[in-house]
Amino acid sequence: MPRKPKRDPPVAAVLSLLVPGLGQMYAGRPERGASILVAGIIVGTLALIWQTLFISFRSTGGFFPYRLALTIYALVFWIWQVIDAYKLAK
């Protein structure tokens, strides 16, 4: 049975930090990396659309909690996928 080549976990984490899913692809899980890349594009696009649609409400503060929640969700997703890439490469 052929052995998988060893991957460097810090390299996988940095790649995932730069482009979501790239670290998973580097770690030998291209299907997982592609899924994370697509999910990252969707989350990022939704965040941009949300910010653009409700930018006029900034002065009232009415939609601030929702914008903050979406931003936090995007950051948590990004941090999670960096940790995931690191663990996959181990």
Image: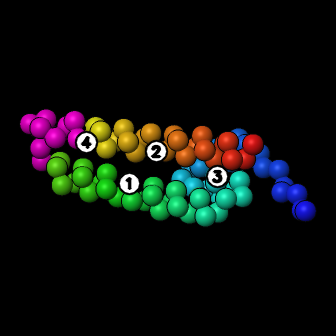
Q: Which mark is residue 77?
A: 2
What kind of element bears circle 1?
Answer: helix
First of labels 2, 4 by sequence position: 4
Q: Which residues are magenta?
A: 56-67
Q: Which residue is mark 1?
A: 43
Q: Which residue is mark 3?
A: 23
Disc 1 marks which amino acid?
Val
- Discs 3, 1 touching: Cβ within 8 Å: no
> Which residue is denoted by mark 4 in the rendering?
67
Near mark 2 (Cα within 10 A), the count class, few <14, some 14-19 or many ≥20, is some
Q: Quadrant of residue 26?
A: bottom right
Task: Give SS at disc 2.
Answer: helix
Residue 76 or 44: which is nearer the viewer?
76
Q: Are marks 1 and 2 in contact (CB under 8 Å)?
A: yes
Residue sitting at 13 percent across and 35 percent down? 61
Colour treatment of the image: rainbow
